[in-house]
Amino acid sequence: MRPVYLDHNATTPLDPRVREAMLPWLGELWGNPSSVHRAGQAAADAVETAREAVAGLLGVEPPEIVFTASGTEANNAVIAAVGGGGGRMVLSAFEHPSVSGAADLLAARGVEVTRVPPGPDGVVDPAAIEAALEGPTALVALMLAQNELGTVQPVAVVAAACRRRGVPVLCDAVQAVGKMPVDARALGVDYLTLGGHKFGGPPGAAALWIRGGAPFEPLLVGGGQERRRRPA
């Protein structure tokens, strides 16, 4: 009996068109995109073409896109850079482990972490998050599509409340991008993460969108790639 794969929320098969686009760079084409020779500049052009495609998918500018190795890395990078910056971190109680686990690390270091539970409908009440913003808050995290339930969260409403208070917002959109329209600017968030393997791309290819002017320090150091935001 031929097996039927039904675990697409965990990961998706590689789209044949993606495989075709990748194959030259796994064989006859190579080069370090940071190199000035012809092979390096060809690789750099390919990276920037990919960056433009991701930016177009989110309705943002290409320089605001930072490529990472996973959604987990992207979420961790934002929380490490912003989450402990002079106040508590507020997140939903059912964020992905890459967000909740990073929040646990902050808590172990003395940062106050507030978790807001969802309602019985699997949706977080924006008023509950807004109520948790009393006092200094460094970061709010709310995913767009919950990875276990599939419920779409009121990110834009929460982001508007946070913006009035000057609180940055991280949106884990890994389970949403590629499955529903996602306009990062319309959501009003400051950081948004996605993972290619959730919608036909390869594992190891993800991205972080950083709104222009939003604070950010790289999680990794040691190189100048991605405008020094994510050295390879």
Image (tube, rainbow, N blue to C red):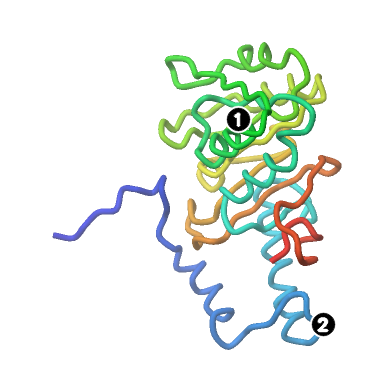
Residue on which the image places disc 1: 142
Q: Quadrant of the C terminus?
A: bottom right
- Rendered position, 178 above or below 230: above
To which quarter of the image does residue 132 belong? top right
Identified at 66% across, 23% down, the residue is 112
Label 2 crowd (10 A; few <14 / some 14-19 / many >=20): few
Point 70% across, 24% down: residue = 88
Image position of 16 with respect to 229: above or below: below
Q: Amino acid at mark 2?
A: Val
Location of residue 168 (image quadrant): top right
Q: x and y percent of residue 118 in the render?
A: 50, 19
Residue 171, position as x, y percentages in the image: 63, 36
Q: Amino acid at mark 1?
A: Leu
In this view, which residue lies farthest toward the left? 1
Residue highlighted by disc 2 = 36
The reply, left or right, for residue 142 in relation to residue 7 is right
Residue in the picture at 63% in, 12% down: 127
Q: Position of residue 93 (x, y in %)?
A: 52, 25
